[in-house]
Image (cartoon, grey):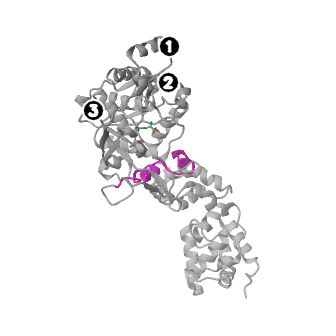
Amino acid sequence: MFIKPYRDVIELLFRTRFAPSPTGYMHLGNLRTALFGYLLARKMGGTFVLRIEDTDQERFVAAAVEKIYETLRIAGISHDEGPDVGGSYGPYVQSERKSNYLEYAKELVAKGSAYYCFCTKDRLEGLEEYDRHCCGLSIDEINKNLADGLSFVIRQLIPQGKTTFIDQVYGEITIENEELEDQVLIKSDGMPTYNFANVVDDHLMAITHVMRGSEYLTSTPKYNLLYQAMGWDIPIYVHLPHILREGGGKLSKRHGDAYFEDFLDKGFLPEAIINYIVLLGWSPPENREIYSLAELEQIFGVEGISKSPSIFDMAKLRWFNGEYLKAMDFDAFYALAESHVRQAVKRQDVDIKALAKIVQGRIATLDELPEMLDFIDNLPEYDTELYTHKKSKCDVAIAADVLSKIAPKLAEYDEGPWNNESLYKFMTDFAQEAGLKNSQVLWPMRVALSGKPATPGGASDLLAILGKAESMRRIHHALSKGGMDVV
Ligand code: GLU
């Protein structure tokens, strides 16, 4: 379960990692980080590592790790190595690697780049500014304290000067070391802090490209000082811009736009989410937007990453989802949509499959179905004003006239099967004979059959779906409404 740092040998290979802390749900920003790291590794023929950073966690959150696993699986992001868990690779889990870190911290102490700190919480809380009190302890004092079993932490000793590094996205960054604090590397319970374990593991796992959110830009100098003190190579850094909401602010749980799971629950397809988020902060080399994961694995590159925050656009995500739904072959779509359609339509005489065919190209997400199909079980109350439709050149009088004349013909309809094509022909033939525009027949029929201004499919689809008896009932109901008397 331990990779030796053959860094010099594999230097030219790309090794990226996703290093989530198990918090429970997968933030969209984190998923994008995972995706970018995965794509870069795939593009370069490298290795993608999954490492769970749980040392700051109160306890090992097994369920949260499961969640990360599950999310990555659904997203199609697979990692390449890790401890053997019954024939497949598990993730590296930092809390299971505890013993490594203390040894490295002691080495840093020996090199003068870290020190034991025995300060009590009370003492620290009483200070206005941290005073490096224990940095000045003699070796004898330290040994005595250790022998006495005093509780301690190990802190990084930040040297004077300034630290500069180059980030692949943000360029050269310089931080005055006095802005950095002597951060704790090993906590009093012997566990490394997240910051320390992160550096040790990136080294041990020979990570060549560290990709993570730009909130880590300011911590990076501290990490670099640790690499330098240990004599380790500093990885290449690729920090990623934030994803913000329209109008500013972070994606949030409250707005239901923070977590991958939120979107799955709303009926978004994982492929559509992945396709959308890859374009948040990265521009593809070609001028198109729809990409499969396999395609992205061929074309992804750091050069397309932008440093300005990307704006999350719900409407755009919906568009992507609609495109993915449309492009699915019907059987796959039906497998996905059947239960949603059944939930929205309880009538037994409706052909659910035919209905699914009609809605496939017309929805952005599956959760639009209940509202879209709500008129099928029960015709909603509607105002006859709905018949007035400028574009169709229709008004209430025309509707009343058309419906009263078409009703007896439809009752005797025997020109062909009761299906979309032949009913469409029936209605357009009727329009022609009556000297009307097609829309002047189709619009009132659509309103009479659905009670709504917008429906999946047109009047002939609705006739086919509802069947003859129900269609006739609705047309007669339309004619019985006030103001629909034919003059
Ligand atoms: N464990 C950190 C997080 O979940 C990741 C930091 C990193 O990628 O270096 O935000």
Amino acid residing under circle 3: Asp
**How would you rate the neighbour count of disc 3 (Cα within 10 Å): few for under 14, some for 14-19, many for 20 or more?**
some
Count how many numbered circles sit on residues in the image: 3
Which region of the structure is painted magenta? 258-283
Q: Is residue 275 magenta?
A: yes
Residue 288 is situated, as x and y percent measured from the top left of the image, at 35, 59
Can you say whether 459 is above or below 209 in the image?
below
- Residue at horizontal 49 percent and vertical 37 percent from the top: 68
Q: Is residue 310 left or right of residue 408?
A: left
Q: Earlier in the sequence, mark 3 or mark 1?
A: 1
Q: Which mark is residue 369?
A: none
Q: Is residue 434 above or below residue 461?
A: below
Q: Amino acid at mark 1?
A: Gly
Taking 405 as reference, is 302 above or below it?
Answer: above
Task: Work out how far the residue at label 2 is from the one at label 1, CA to CA, in angstroms.
Answer: 13 Å
Q: Residue 119 has which mark? A: 2
For residue 233, the mark is 3
- Horizontal and vertical percent position of residue 337: 56, 52
Q: Nearer the viewer, mark 2 or mark 1?
A: 2
User: SS class of the residue under badge 1?
Assistant: loop
- Mark 3, ligand 1, within 8 Å: the answer is no
Image quarter of the C terminus: bottom right
Q: Residues within 10 Å of mark 2 (few under 14, many from 20)?
A: some
Q: Which residue is mark 1?
A: 149
Q: CA distance from mark 3 to mark 2?
A: 33 Å
